Image (tube, rainbow, N blue to C red):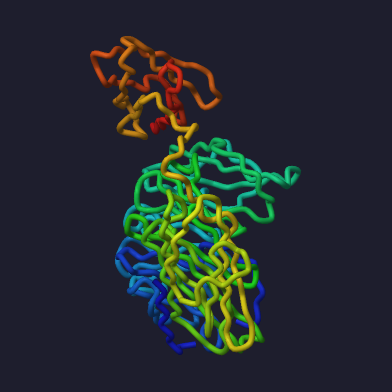
């Protein structure tokens, strides 16, 4: 659904490819967010308690470069040049700020506990920024691009680049609170672009959005990424994102400023289904709105006949909508949020064009809908019937690996591999049991894999944290 609430509260012209997640931060309560946004005369810190539908400017005098909320109700931090940290225990209200520390990094992170704040990966404080504990960061290399901590204690991430390798970004992971770092993934991104990581509410859960505005979701400490959405944004908007306080909750902020500040707008996109669909709110407005077409659906594949309900979260002073559900040039609907039934199999590209009084904007999602025949045989289906999993995952000392063996198999082995693919241990199992305990012994923290030594056995990932 699409919800827009206009509040005429109220910097100069900025054309920014501002891929900065520090512009918005979640508060300790559900629905509470803070963000840096335009005011009538400049820029200020805003607070919202209703998911961004409305917001109040709490301070338009602080020269904040970034903000960070504590888990303690009312506590907020901001960072200002030259690298100073300020603290408020009154929701960031003007006049409540106290200088805390210097030599900080812009874009630091709130911690997992009250009073905990991280200064990049170099140090953290457990007493609201008064004192900091330094991290050794063994294994760090290159130039830092971004930092995030996980909801799992002592786990965190750093993205880095190497000047001589312009087409790669390295994702480092720590299992001991940035004392040691190791390469987690190497991604094919231009180092001038990249991606931001924002933790969700569960251990190992993260949202990742890249500079092309593709949104990914991970439940395994950023090892595998599932694409959830893509957006029709561009470099003329300042962008921020942050995970929420509820499972599946994700926020994006879009700020538009042009014409020497004559037009200023802040939009908050709020999702409760892991970034698949959004409500869009408009807590600050001044002047003419920009025009951007955006849509998605929770149903992108299925068997025919396939009914699809589209969610529209376009922005602008929209006068009309034109939907082309198979990109054949024929308009299929003029509704704001239509439903459409696909009667034939295949891949379908969908286009939404929106119009205001002066211009139009379109968004084409290629091969977005996939319709299959319910009677067709899926040759890629794994018919082995093997089930394999383990709990807890990650673990420190031991985990229980559960399995089932095909009816004609009485004995097998579970093979354990390290991240380089080297076999490090085998565990004998039989059909009389359905689980076995595995102990980490002297293995170091990191990612490992396991499988049954049978054809068509799935390969599962296991994480040790010490």
Residue 114: percent from the left, percent from the top? 32, 57
Relative to residue 327, is residue 452 depicted above or below?
above
Q: Name the residue: 51% across, 55% down.
A: 369
Is 247 situated left or right of 240 in this image? Answer: left
> 349 and 454: which one is in front?
349
Q: Quadrant of the C terminus?
A: top left
> 407 and 163: which one is in front?
407
Relative to residue 266, is residue 379 depicted above or below?
above
- Quarter-wise, where is residue 100 in the image? bottom left
- Quarter-wise, where is residue 374 in the image? top left
Q: Name the residue: 44% across, 80% down.
A: 283
Considering every residue shown, the one lying at the far left of the view is 432
> 173 and 208: which one is in front?
208
> 292 and 208: which one is in front?
292
Q: How many marks?
A: 0
Relative to residue 132, is residue 250 depicted above or below?
below
Q: Name the residue: 58% across, 81% down.
A: 355
Is 190 situated left or right of 249 in this image? Answer: right
Residue 147: percent from the left, percent from the top? 52, 51
Relative to residue 262, is residue 136 depicted above or below?
above
Residue 336: percent from the left, percent from the top? 46, 76
């Amino acid at each position: 659904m699409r919800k827009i609430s206009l509040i005429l509260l109220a910097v100069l012209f900025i054309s920014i490819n501002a891929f900065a997640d520090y512009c918005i931060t979640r508060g300790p309560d559900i629905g509470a967010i803070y963000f840096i946004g335009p005011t009538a005369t400049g820029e200020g810190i805003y607070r919202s308690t209703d998911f961004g539908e409305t917001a109040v400017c709490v301070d338009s005098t602080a020269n904040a470069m970034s903000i960070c909320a504590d888990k303690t109700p009312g506590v907020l931090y901001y960072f200002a040049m030259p690298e100073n940290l300020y603290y408020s225990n009154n929701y960031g209200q003007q006049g409540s700020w106290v200088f805390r520390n210097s030599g900080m990094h812009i874009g630091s992170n709130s911690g997992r506990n009250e009073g905990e704040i991280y200064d990049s990966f170099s140090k953290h404080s457990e007493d609201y920024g008064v004192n900091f504990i330094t991290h050794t960061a063994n294994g760090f290399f290159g130039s830092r691009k971004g930092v995030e901590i996980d909801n799992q204690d002592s786990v965190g991430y750093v993205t880095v680049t190497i000047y001589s390798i312009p087409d790669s970004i390295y994702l480092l992971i720590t299992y001991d609170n940035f004392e040691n770092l190791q390469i987690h993934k190497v991604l094919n991104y231009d180092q001038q672009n990249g991606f931001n990581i924002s933790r969700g509410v569960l251990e190992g859960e993260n949202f990742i959005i890249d500079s092309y505005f593709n949104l990914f979701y991970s439940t395994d400490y950023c090892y595998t990424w599932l694409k959830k959405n893509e957006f029709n944004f561009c470099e003329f908007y300042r962008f921020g994102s942050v995970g929420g306080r509820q499972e599946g909750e994700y926020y994006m902020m879009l700020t538009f400023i042009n014409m020497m500040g004559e037009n200023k707008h802040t939009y908050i996109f709020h999702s409760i289904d892991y970034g698949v669909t959004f409500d869009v709110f408009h807590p600050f407005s001044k002047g003419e709105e920009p025009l951007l077409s955006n849509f998605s659906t929770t149903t992108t594949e299925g068997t025919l006949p396939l009914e699809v309900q589209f969610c529209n979260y376009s922005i602008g002073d929209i006068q009309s909508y034109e939907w082309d559900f198979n990109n054949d040039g024929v308009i299929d609907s003029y509704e704001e949020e239509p439903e459409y039934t696909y009667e034939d199999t295949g891949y379908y590209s969908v286009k939404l064009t929106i119009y205001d009084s002066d211009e139009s904007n379109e968004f084409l999602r290629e091969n977005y809908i996939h319709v299959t025949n319910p009677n067709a045989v899926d040759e890629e289906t794994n018919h082995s019937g093997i089930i394999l999993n383990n709990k807890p995952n990650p673990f420190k000392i031991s985990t229980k690996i559960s399995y089932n063996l095909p009816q004609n198999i009485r004995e097998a082995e579970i093979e354990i591999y390290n991240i380089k693919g080297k076999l490090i241990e085998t565990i004998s199992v039989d059909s009389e049991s359905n689980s076995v305990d595995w102990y980490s012994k002297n293995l170091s923290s990191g990612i490992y894999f396991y499988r049954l030594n049978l054809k068509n056995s799935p390969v599962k990932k296991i994480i040790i944290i010490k």
